[in-house]
Image: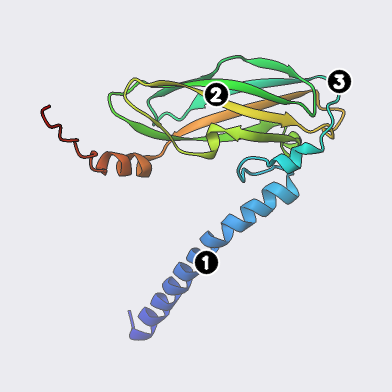
């Protein structure tokens, strides 16, 4: 290969590398735009504030069936399921549902729950005011915990939607688990004899 061909190949490789790097960072905002603007899927931004739900009026004439589902990624040795599979709700009223998570391993593990709402058009009308999915969840070896979610279905939910499915998938948060395992244990308190 000539020197000219080598320089051309290196230049092409460098350009492709830079373009790949830029494209990777551009995907995140494009993903948010596509989800929220094109597909109408509300992405998690934390709990819905009191001001957002304060003006909602309960629609006693309408009942929505909310189905609950829970799964665990295969890399996380937990069991996770809803305490009840369905609930009848009136739009505009706050409800609470519980999930049960259990660490079946012999060591502490941090997990994060990724929620989804189906149909996707209902996601903008389903608001969580409190949820275990907003924070990392640490379960010690063998620990079982009740995990509540408080939610409100907006009365403006389109009339053709009569069933909403709230689903969570728990994933292992290896970085947070490593951070907790690596943290030094709190110092023992010295006791003095009376």
* Sooner in the amino-acid sequence: mark 1 or mark 2: 1
The quarter of the image holding the N terminus is bottom left
Q: Which label sits on residue 42?
A: none
Rendering coords of residue 164 (x, y %): 72, 26
Disc 2 is placed on an element classified as strand
Secondary structure at numbered mark 1: helix
The image position of residue 101, as x and y in percent, is 46, 22
Q: Few, some or many C-alpha atoms within 10 Å of disc 2 (few <14, some 14-19, many ≥20)?
A: many
Closer to the observer: label 2 or label 3?
3
Which residue carries the number 3 mark?
Answer: 60
Within 10 angstroms of label 1, few (less than 14), some, or many (20 or more) residues?
few
Q: Which residue is mark 1?
A: 22
Marking on residue 70? 2
Residue drawn 84% across the image and 31% down it: 57
Q: Quarter of the image for the C terminus: give it.
A: top left
Q: Position of residue 86 (x, y in %)?
A: 67, 16
Q: Earlier in the sequence, mark 1 or mark 3?
A: 1
Q: Quadrant of residue 139?
A: top left
Q: Secondary structure at mark 3?
A: loop
Q: Nearer the viewer, residue 129 or 153?
A: 129
Q: Residues within 10 Å of mark 3 (few under 14, many from 20)?
A: few
Q: Is 170 placed left or right of 131 in the picture?
A: left
Give the image location of residue 40, x and y in percent.
74, 44
Q: Nearer the viewer, mark 1 or mark 3?
A: 3
Colour pattern = rainbow
Residue drawn at the location 60% of the way across and 28% of the way down = 149
Question: Is 1 drawn above or below residue 105 in the view shown?
Answer: below
């Amino acid at each position: 290969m000539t020197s000219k061909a080598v320089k051309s190949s290196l230049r092409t490789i460098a350009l492709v590398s830079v373009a790949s790097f830029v494209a990777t960072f551009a995907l995140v905002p494009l993903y948010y735009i596509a989800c929220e603007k094109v597909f109408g899927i509300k992405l998690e931004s934390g709990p819905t504030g009191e001001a957002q739900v304060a003006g909602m009026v309960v629609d006693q004439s309408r009942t929505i069936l909310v189905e609950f589902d829970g799964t665990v990624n295969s890399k996380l040795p937990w069991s996770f399921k809803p305490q009840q599979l369905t609930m009848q709700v009136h739009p505009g009223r706050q409800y609470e549902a519980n999930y049960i998570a259990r660490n079946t391993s012999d060591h502490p593990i941090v997990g994060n729950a990724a929620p989804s709402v189906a149909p996707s058009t209902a996601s903008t009308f389903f608001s969580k005011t409190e949820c275990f999915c907003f924070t990392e969840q640490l379960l010690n070896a063998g620990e079982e915990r009740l995990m509540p979610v408080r939610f409100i279905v907006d009365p403006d939910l389109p009339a053709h939607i009569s069933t909403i499915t709230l689903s969570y998938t728990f994933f292992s948060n290896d970085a947070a688990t490593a951070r907790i395992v690596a943290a030094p244990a709190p110092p023992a308190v010295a006791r003095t004899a009376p």
